[in-house]
Image (tube, rainbow, N blue to C red):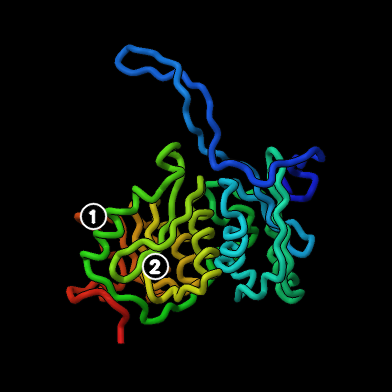
Amino acid sequence: MLSPSAESISLEDTAAPSVLAAFVQRDVQRSRDGQTVIQRDCIAEEIPVALIYNGTAHVVMMATPQNLDDFALGFSLSEGLIEAVQELQSIEIEYASDAVRVLMQIPEKRHAALLLQGRNMVGRSGCGICGTQDIAQVLRAPAMVGEGVFINEAALKKALTNLHDQQSINAVTGATHAAAWATPDGVITMLREDVGRHNALDKLIGALTRIEIDFGAGFLLITSRASYEMALKAVNVGISLMAAISAPTALAIRVADQANMSLLGFARPQSHVIYTHPQRIVSEPPGRSK
């Protein structure tokens, strides 16, 4: 495994772009029904993003280089490295042509706890716990969510129906996951995309935290399977209902059940499966429980 030290990624000394594109364009050879043509195609970008706290390289994640300030904040919160947005005292993003370093300052007590984790490794875009060195650290007990949001099936259908049209990067590349936030009446108010499903969720958590959204007053949609890491990130910030387009894992179900989170899978506008705490899907008009 590669340690995410400052030397482990290529950061050119030459003038670097102030931001990297979410996708690049390439000429490709496309074949269909025996016919071959050369076309311009949009390819999702994936680059190393080094997360560095108080000068200590913590992890390198493979990610789409967009909304990285949201990503850094969301990752810090969902992984329990900080407990509030105010604890992310500063953030600086250094761009290069092939990598990004995110330099963050957190309280010294948080940094000391981070050093005990020893997670100085590379995290791939499909992995949410890469680099974790201790099983107990991975299988940590989830937080309990509150009573949370109650919605009806019409609200869920509305959000799922509109989800695809709001995925602008995926629309041109077909390669990114999305995490979206919806109000109790099914209106999507925020969406983030990334080649990694965990990254997309962290970006969304960061963006919502910045605008002080109440995580108990809406619900989460994800365009991936509901893995253990996704469920744990959601409950860690107080999300009470998560609906996944694909299936959950058995461990994700156990985490959601223990944490009092409603977990839905195979979510489609016309159908869904409820795995835990079905009481939040009600027949009455959607709203916050009294």
Taking the image as shown, residue 195 lies to the left or right of residue 54, namely left
Mark in the foreground, 1 or 2:
1
- Front one among 246 and 71: 71
Element under label 2?
helix
Residue 44 appearing in the image:
yes
Splitting the image into 4 quarters, where does residue 222 fall?
bottom left
Q: Residue furthest left?
A: 283
**How far from the left and from the top, in percent, is residue 239?**
43, 71
Taking the image as shown, residue 120 lies to the left or right of residue 45, namely right
Which residue type does callout 1 highlight?
Pro
Q: Which residue is mark 2?
A: 254
Could you tell me how far apart the alpha carbons at marks 1 and 2 are, in whole angstroms?
A: 25 Å
Taking 50 as reference, is 17 above or below it? above
Residue 1 appearing in the image:
no
Which residue type does callout 2 highlight?
Arg
Which quarter of the rendered picture does the N terminus lie within? top right
Of the image marks 1 and 2, the number of the one nearer the N terminus = 2
Taking 194 as reference, is 70 above or below it? below
Residue density around tag 2, few if under 14, some if 14–19, many if 20 or more, within 10 Å: some
Please give the label number shown on residue 51: none
Question: Image point 38% across, 51% down: which residue?
Answer: 166
Splitting the image into 4 quarters, where does residue 20 fall?
top right
Question: Image point 73% across, 49% down: which residue?
Answer: 3
Q: Which residue is mark 1?
A: 269
- Front one among 230 and 53: 53
Residue density around tag 1, few if under 14, some if 14–19, many if 20 or more, within 10 Å: some
Taking the image as shown, residue 89 lies to the left or right of residue 201, namely right
Counting labels gives 2
